[in-house]
Amino acid sequence: MKKYIFIIVLLFLGIQNYAQKNEYRYFSIKLGYSQGFSGQPGFNANKYLNTPYGDMQLTPSDSYLGFIPGFSGALYYHFDFTNDMAGVYTGIEYNNFGVAAKYETVNGVYSMVEQHRLNSVGIPLGVKIGKKFYDDQRYFFLGTQFNYNISMKSVQKPSWLNTPSATKLDANEFQKTSMGFFAGFNWMVLNVALVYYPGSFFNKEYINPDLNIKPYAEQNDNMFFVNVSFHVPLPLSTGWVGTKSYKLKRFFRKMGL
């Protein structure tokens, strides 16, 4: 394993060195916040909540907008065309995001907010379109991303308890991979994207071995995320950032970036 990591690092440094000789090929980093939106799941006859008065049937709350905050980080490699008006990019991206839902008891006395948070690593493939966008870093982009989902955690927040409960899902309870589609714009260091996942993160065919039920059969598809990120080309000290601000250039050089 160490040998492969060493080879990858060497290739990375070699590509970066070559990219610095040509402004149309360069790395960039992105760090940002994501806000997820998802529709409420359908009614599941096997969804119960252990309340102070015993187990009670739960129904999805129609008035609740399922949203959950998250964050992401990415390293991209850009191949801008020589006309400086179009290009493509790829790389590796980490996402911590998820979906949320609210359930209520039939009598409306008790409720529970349930969040499912996913950790995933993805490979994006994007297309950039703009007008002489290298100097200003202003362009529109769209593309797709293949994700490998590492783990998922469930957090339940009952209305009568101050402390939520968290559970790590078994690997069979969620999808190992997912495919998303995105579109957005980049303005200087601000990157805004709308991401759409047409499927579900859950394994709807999963059967709980203890209860012999499908707990995720009614989970909703079609999930949307709005990502707002800080996005800059590399290297920070001598590249695009350095040409925009001498103070930032000095700071990044002191940091060794």
Image (cartoon, grey):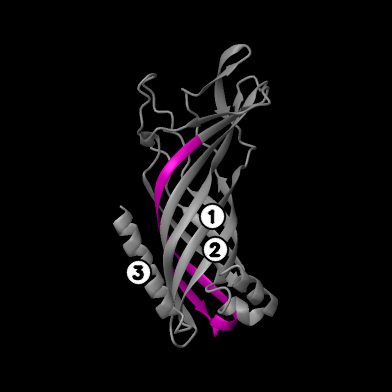
Q: Position of residue 144 (x, y in %)?
A: 42, 62
State the residue position of label 2. Answer: 30
**x and y percent of residue 31 in the render?**
57, 60
Q: Which mark is in front, 3 or 2?
A: 3
Write down the region rendered in magenta.
125-153
Give the mark, 3 or 1, whose residue is nearer the N terminus: 3
The answer to whether residue 136 is above or below residue 210 is below
Structural distance between the alpha carbons of marks 3 and 2:
21 Å
Q: Main secondary structure of the magenta part?
A: strand
Amino acid marked by disc 3: Leu
Secondary structure of residue under mark 3: helix
Which label is found at residue 256?
none
**Earlier-in-chain disc, 3 versus 2:** 3
174 or 216: which is nearer to us?
174
> Magenta span has 230?
no
Determine crowd level at label 3: few under 14, some 14-19, many 20+ residues with C-alpha closer than 10 A. Answer: few
Amino acid residing under circle 1: Ser
Residue in the image at 39% along x and 74% along y: 15
Q: Are marks 1 and 2 in contact (CB under 8 Å)?
A: yes
